[in-house]
């Protein structure tokens, strides 16, 4: 075991991540304030961050990570980005649902503290991703440490949120096309991430850089249609909030999907621009 690594900035930040995520789910569990799909999601986020970060620290300190047949740098970068996004969502979702004026004083104190721990944990992962592990210009590193690689994780995560907001049926052709676009782009993007981590992407008998650019351009074109088609057809079915009651309002879900669609469209545009620059300018230089 290399004890010198214990005092490196990256390991210190990861110890903070472990402490903060553990404290967050422990505070919530102590008052059993997670009895809904939203609470279960928040608990899952904190526990996942806690367990995987402990695993990463143990494997790196013992050196056993080198025996695992994956790209360790790509795996840690992808997980750090994923944890940052999940904790960002959780830090907004949990207090908006569970921390309210009518909750008992002690319970509110626990839930408020858990929210604070979650926010601090989000910043800890953001610091790791932005300041410690992301590839700097001119550095040789894994694909998922670069801006296009991190955007791939972001695009997949946003698509997952879109899927969670989709209604159960799609009677109109425009909605069916939108769901098809979400699914196709999500599957291919996630496959790229998995192949990169498994060190298989570079072994494919194709010019992978140009294929990725081609996919990004196709994704941008498909998302352009969805940005227009989804709200046009969805709000024809659900024109107002008259049928809403409590959580799970389809009208509100439709607004959320529309916003997330625009965000993912912009993400694919930025991904395309960065990938184009990396292939046709960096390589030539």
Image (cartoon, helix red, strand yellow):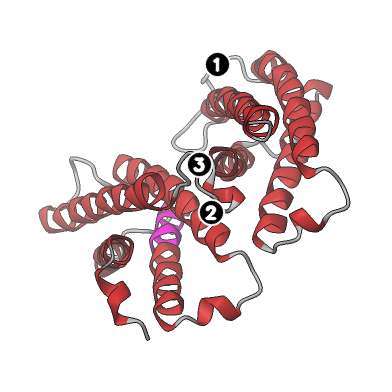
- The residue depicted at 50 percent of the width and 54 percent of the height is 77
Query: Which comes sooner in the sequence, label 3 or label 1?
Result: 3
Q: Quadrant of residue 213?
A: top right
Q: Quadrant of the N terminus?
A: bottom left
- The answer to whether residue 49 is above or below residue 222 is below
Q: Secondary structure at mark 2?
A: helix
Query: Which comes sooner in the sequence, label 3 or label 2?
Result: 2
Query: Which comes sooner in the sequence, label 1 or label 2?
Result: 2
Q: Secondary structure at mark 1?
A: loop
Magenta segment, which residues?
39-46
Residue situated furthest bottom in the rendering: 1
Q: Quadrant of residue 274?
A: top right
Please rate how many residues cluster around mark 1, counting C-alpha atoms within 10 Å: few if below 14, some from 14 to 19, many from 20.
Answer: few
Between marks 3 and 1 in the image, the one whose residue lies nearer the viewer: 3
Q: Quadrant of residue 17?
A: bottom left
Q: Secondary structure at mark 3?
A: loop
State the image coordinates of residue 210 (x, y, percent, origin top left).
Answer: 79, 35
Residue picked out by circle 3: 138
Tell whether label 2 touches label 3 (CB within 8 Å).
no
State the image coordinates of residue 267 (x, y, percent, origin top left).
Answer: 58, 29
Residue picked out by circle 1: 240
Q: Is residue 13 magenta?
A: no
* Disc sitting over residue 199 in the figure: none
Between marks 3 and 2 in the image, the one whose residue lies nearer the viewer: 3
- The answer to whether residue 16 is above or below residue 245 is below
Q: Quadrant of the C terminus?
A: top right
> What's the distance in space between the residues labelled 1 and 2, CA to CA?
39 Å
* 243 or 179, nearer to the observer: 179
Please rate how many residues cluster around mark 2, counting C-alpha atoms within 10 Å: few if below 14, some from 14 to 19, many from 20.
Answer: many
In the shown orientation, is residue 19 left or right of residue 45?
left
> What's the distance in space between the residues labelled 3 and 2, CA to CA?
20 Å
């Amino acid at each position: 075991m290399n004890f010198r690594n214990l005092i490196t900035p990256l390991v210190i930040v990861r110890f903070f991540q472990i402490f903060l995520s553990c404290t967050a789910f422990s505070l919530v569990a102590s008052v059993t304030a997670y009895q809904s799909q939203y609470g279960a999601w928040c608990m899952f986020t904190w526990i996942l961050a806690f367990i995987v970060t402990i695993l990463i620290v143990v494997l790196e300190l013992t050196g056993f990570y080198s025996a695992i047949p994956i790209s360790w740098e790509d795996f840690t970068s992808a997980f750090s980005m994923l944890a940052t996004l999940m904790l960002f969502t959780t830090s907004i979702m949990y207090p908006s649902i569970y921390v309210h004026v009518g909750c008992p004083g002690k319970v509110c104190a626990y839930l408020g503290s858990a929210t604070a721990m979650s926010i601090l944990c989000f910043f800890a992962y953001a610091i790791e991703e932005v300041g410690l592990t992301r590839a700097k210009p001119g550095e040789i590193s894994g694909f998922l440490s670069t801006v296009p690689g991190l955007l791939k994780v972001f695009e997949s995560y946003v698509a997952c949120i879109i899927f969670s907001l989709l209604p159960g049926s799609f009677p109109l052709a425009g909605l069916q096309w939108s769901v098809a676009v979400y699914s196709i782009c999500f599957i291919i993007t996630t496959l790229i991430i998995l192949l990169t981590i498994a060190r298989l992407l570079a072994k494919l008998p194709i010019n992978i850089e140009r294929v990725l650019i081609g996919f990004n351009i196709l994704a941008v074109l498909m998302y352009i249609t969805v940005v227009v088609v989804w709200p046009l057809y969805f709000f024809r079915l659900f024109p107002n909030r008259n049928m809403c009651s409590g959580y799970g309002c389809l009208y509100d879900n439709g607004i959320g999907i529309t916003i997330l669609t625009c965000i993912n469209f912009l993400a694919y545009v930025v991904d395309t621009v960065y990938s184009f620059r990396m292939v046709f300018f960096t390589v030539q230089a």
